[in-house]
Image (cartoon, rainbow, N blue to C red):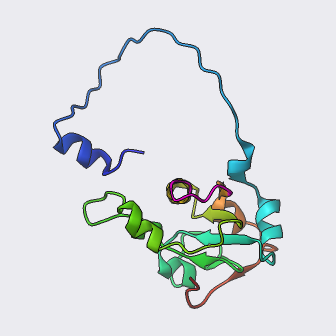
Amino acid sequence: ILNGGLTEWTSTGNELSLEPVNRPTQRLTPKPRPELIAHHDEVLAGIDNEAVILIDTLPEEFYRGEMSIYPRPGHISGAVNINGLSLLDKTGHLLKQDELALMHSFDRNARIITYCGGGIVASTYAFVLNRLGFHNVAVYMASLEEWTANPNNPMETGEVKQ
C-alpha cells in the first residue's frame, strides 16, 4: 500500500517512468492464505451469526440505498457501515494508529468480513484492521458485484448501523 498514493510518491521527488526495467530473475515461493478471502457462502452464513461482523466499507449513501451502481441498492443484511475513506486524512494518508484504534472497538475474537463494490476499499480496510491487531479478518473480494446479482441474497436499505 502506497500511503498517500501516487501524489505522495511524486510530491516527495520520486520519479515515474514508462521504460522497462530489467531485474535479475528471482524465485517466488507463494504461501497462499485462503482464510484471508471470504466467499459467498461464508458471508451468507455470517448474516445471523453473532460471531461474525460484516463491514460495508462504501459511503453511507450506498449503504442506505440512496445511491447504487449495482443491480440492487443497499447493503448485505446485518452489515455495519464504516466508510473506507474515513480511514484517510485530508491528504490521502492513513490516519495515525491511535486514531484508527479509536474507531474500532470490535470483538477481537470475531470473524470480520469486509466488503465494498469489488474488494478494493475492503482490502485496504482489512489491512488496517490487521495492523490494529484483528487477526481473523477476511475480504469478500466479489463484494456487491457478485452479491447484488443474485436476487436471493438478502439485502437491506436504511439508516447506518455502526
**Residue 18 appears in which quarter of the rendering?**
top left
Task: Decide whether residue 47 is among the magenta residues.
Answer: no
Q: Residue furthest top?
A: 24
Image point (68%, 71%), residue name:
53
Asked whether the viewer can see residue 85, the reply is no
Q: Main secondary structure of the magenta part?
A: loop
Asked whether the viewer can see residue 79, the reply is yes
Image point (52%, 77%), residue name:
62
Where does residue 132 sit, x and y in percent of width and height? 51, 59
Q: Is residue 20 above or below residue 68?
A: above
Image point (54%, 75%), residue name:
68
> Left or right of 85: which side holds 137?
right
154 or 129: which is nearer to us? 129
Where does residue 66 sit, x and y in percent of width and height? 52, 85
**Residue 126 appears in which quarter of the rendering?**
bottom right
Where does residue 2 sit, x and y in percent of width and height? 37, 44
Please count the marks in the image: 0
Q: Quadrant of the N terminus?
A: top left
122 or 152: which is nearer to us? 122
Image point (62%, 63%), residue name:
114
> Left or right of 89: which side holds 120?
right
Where does residue 127 sit, x and y in percent of width and height? 52, 53
Q: Which residues are magenta?
A: 130-136
> Left or right of 44: which side holds 61?
left
Q: Quadrant of the C terminus?
A: bottom right
> Left or right of 149: which side holds 11?
left
Q: Residue furthest bottom?
A: 159
